[in-house]
Image (cartoon, rainbow, N blue to C red):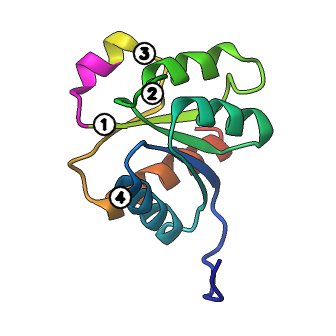
Amino acid sequence: MGTHLQAPDHGHVLAVDDCATMREILRTSLESAGCSVDLVDSGWAALEAAAQARYDAIILDVEMPGLDGLAVGRALRQDPRTARAMIAIHTSIEEAAVRAGFSQYDLYLPKAGSPRELGEHVLRMIRGRRHGA
């Protein structure tokens, strides 16, 4: 927690990735887009965080040890408290393979994409939900 000026809060986002470097990239990208960000490093931690706080969007890495992102996405959709959460899949796996394992996500974000674009895409997804799109 620094003393720097914060951008306006355009959404509360949970970012889930088992790689510390990727979590920091996600934090920087999302905070640059004006989002407040919580980071967790596992699928189990994601389910716990989602049960305790309301998120405008949840970004899931697919390949994680233990409970992977597809299983987390399915669990979020089955729980009435989180069933309407906006879910973005952030992965290097091809979209068709992701969709075969979990088709109820709102946004596919390839890991090869730019961090700036990632934040912009998530912000557009949040704004679209807020404005009923």
Measuring 21% from the left and 27% from the top, which residue is drawn there? 94
Q: Is residue 97 magenta?
A: yes
Task: Name above or below for residue 96 compared with residue 84.
Answer: above
Q: Please state, as top left, top right, bottom left or bottom right, where the C terminus lies in the image.
A: top right
Amino acid type at circle 1 is Thr
Residue 131 makes an appearance in the image: no
Instruction: Determine whether label 3 and label 1 are within 8 Å by CB.
Output: no
Q: Earlier in the sequence, mark 2 or mark 1?
A: 2
Amino acid type at circle 3 is Phe
Q: Earlier in the sequence, mark 3 or mark 1?
A: 1
Amino acid type at circle 4 is Thr
Residue 76 makes an appearance in the image: yes
Residue denoted by label 4? 21
Residue denoted by label 1? 91
Measuring 49% from the left and 22% from the top, which residue is drawn there? 67
Estimate the spatial distance between the alpha carbons at disc 4 and disc 2, rounded to whole Å.
17 Å
Query: Which element is circle 2 on?
Result: helix
Q: Which residues are magenta?
A: 92-98
Amino acid type at circle 2 is Gly
Query: Which element is circle 1 on?
Result: strand
Residue denoted by label 2? 69
Estimate the spatial distance between the alpha carbons at disc 2 and disc 1, rounded to whole Å.
9 Å
Task: Name above or below for residue 29 compared with residue 98.
Answer: below
How many residues crowd mark 3 within 10 Å: few (<14), some (14–19), many (20+)? some
